[in-house]
Image: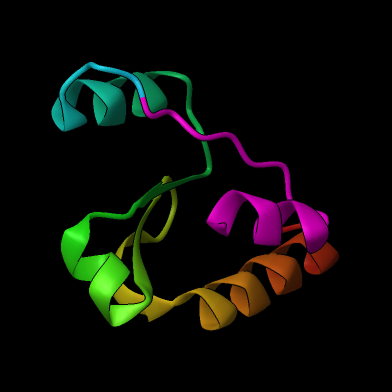
Amino acid sequence: EIVDRMKQAGVRAELDAGNDSLGKRIREGKKQKLPYLLVVGDAEMSARTVTAESRDHGKLEGVSLDEFLARLTKEIAERT
């Protein structure tokens, strides 16, 4: 659902639901220098939020998807 909403907003997004551990998937994303990594676990699913790790801005915890998408589309528009 999250990937679909991001793509509808014009944001490139991929889902990594592989069998690797969460830590390994996060390390791999950081190695690829991805601007944002979203982590959605059971707690985020029940609260309808996301935890985002930004390459430049640190960690954002418990942010609603709408709020995160608004921030992300603003950054894209401003090319920051």
Q: Residue at x 84, y 66 (%)?
A: 77
Q: How many marks?
A: 0
Q: Residue at x 75, y 51 (%)?
A: 7
* Vertical position of residue 61 compared to residue 5: above or below: below
* Vertical position of residue 41 compared to residue 35: above or below: below
**Residue toward you, 4 or 27:** 4
**Residue toward you, 56 or 24:** 24
- The residue stretch that appears in magenta: 1-17
The quadrant the C terminus occupies is: bottom right
* Vertical position of residue 19 compared to residue 68: above or below: above
**Residue toward you, 30 or 2:** 2
Instruction: Using residue 75 as the reference point, say whether residue 78 is left or right of it.
Output: right
The percent coordinates of residue 8 (x first, y second) are 80, 59
**Residue toward you, 5 or 26:** 5
Color style of the picture: rainbow
Magenta stretch: residue 59 in it? no
Instruction: Using residue 19 as the reference point, say whether residue 21 is left or right of it.
Output: left
The percent coordinates of residue 4 (x first, y second) are 68, 53
The percent coordinates of residue 14 (x first, y second) are 58, 34
What is the quadrant of residue 49 in the picture?
A: bottom left
The percent coordinates of residue 13 (x first, y second) are 64, 41
* Vertical position of residue 28 compared to residue 34: above or below: above
Magenta stretch: residue 14 in it? yes
Instruction: Using residue 61 as the reference point, say whether residue 2 is left or right of it.
Output: right
Instruction: Using residue 74 as the reference point, say whether residue 50 is left or right of it.
Output: left
What is the quadrant of residue 1 in the picture?
A: bottom right
